[in-house]
Image (spheres, helix red, strand yellow):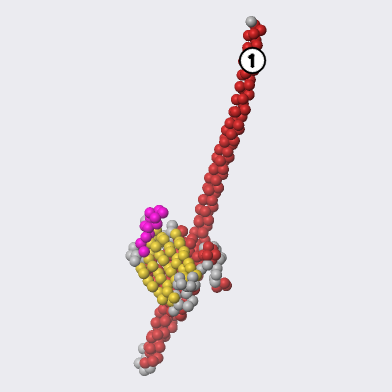
Amino acid sequence: MPKQHDANSQLKISNLRLIAEECLKINSPLQKTKLKNLKSRHQLEVHQIELEMQNEEILRLCALEKEAFERYTDAKFAALGEMAEGIAHEINNPLEAVTNLLYLINEEKDLPEQARSFTHLAQQELARVSQIATQTLRFYRQPTARTAVRVSEQLDSVLKLYQGRLASAGVEIVRDYRVSAPLLAFEGELRQVFTNLVGNALDASRNGGKMTLRTREATDWRTGRKGIRITVADRGHGMSKETLRRIFEPFFSTKGITGTGLGLWVTLGIIQKHDGRVKVRSSESAEHHGTVFSLFIPHREKD
């Protein structure tokens, strides 16, 4: 009996070993899969942490770049303001003297009528030069805080600066202003933006055409903020896709030695400083050629 019992026990142990081996064979791939999944999950977590660190670094660098640009813009306007003030002062002094001389000539009783008409035209042109000098000075007098700016008035003042070139190029101006509320903004900077856009539209309209300036109350549907949309559109030669892709790069220009390549780069920075956005469309097709710049600048509370 003991021998038979031992034989049965040995058989049971042998069977258990076989079952254990089979279980190991079954569980071994499962264990490997489990370990593999744990390793993949760990790698994913590490990757997510690395991405978060990279995003934080990108945001930090963007903030530093924005701060550097604002400092550059403020310094540039301060330097240009001093220079413009000196130039305007030097121009206005002789203009005042010439204006007084023309007044005295016009007061002569025996002055021929044709000469009198010439002096009248000269006085008008001198007044226009004086106005241009004054407006140029206003471009670079940068206030320390935002002020109420009427966009239509800013656009019209820029058009006055380009009045001679617009007439020479035969460009038709269409004003479509439908905004009465002012923007709280830096006046000199907005004027710089409009000068860049109108100047570029004029350069593109070498053989006449039409330039449209439009203002509308609008909403940024991404944020829900109310603001003003300003559109400057021309029917010039348009831009290629490659040019359109690079227009906001610093020092990129299609104007050769006459262009600095900074106008649109500065324009984008100023609009972003005002929490706004810029959109551009352009076409070189024979039927529908030209470029449209659309700016959105949100309203804001007083500082």
Q: How many marks?
A: 1
Residue 17 in sight from this viewpoint: yes
Q: What residue lies at 43% left-to-right and 69% top-to-bottom? A: 233
Q: What residue lies at 40% left-to-right and 87% top-to-bottom? A: 119
Crowding near pointer 1: few (<14 within 10 Å), some, many (20+)?
A: few
Front-most of residues 101 and 276:
276
Q: Residue furthest right?
A: 3
What secondary structure is the magenta-colored segment mainly?
A: strand
Front-most of residues 58 and 45:
45
> Residue 21, relative to residue 55: is it above or below?
above
Front-most of residues 91 and 239:
239
Residue 252 locus on image (x, y percent): 56, 66
Q: Quadrant of residue 111?
A: bottom left
Which residue is label 1 attached to?
Answer: 11
Q: What residue lies at 40% left-to-right and 57% top-to-bottom? A: 220
**Tag 1: residue type?**
Leu
> Residue 36, relative to residue 131: is it above or below?
above
Q: Residue furthest top?
A: 1
> Residue 22, relative to residue 198: is it above or below?
above
Residue 149 locus on image (x, y percent): 38, 64
Residue 190 locus on image (x, y percent): 43, 65
Check the picture and name the quadrant holding the C terminus.
bottom left
Element type where label 1 sits in the image: helix
Query: Which contiguous range is marked in magenta?
Result: 216-227
Residue 222 included in the magenta stretch of the image: yes
Residue 290 locus on image (x, y percent): 46, 70
Q: What residue lies at 37% left-to-right and 58% top-to-bottom? A: 219
Q: Is residue 21 left or right of residue 235?
A: right
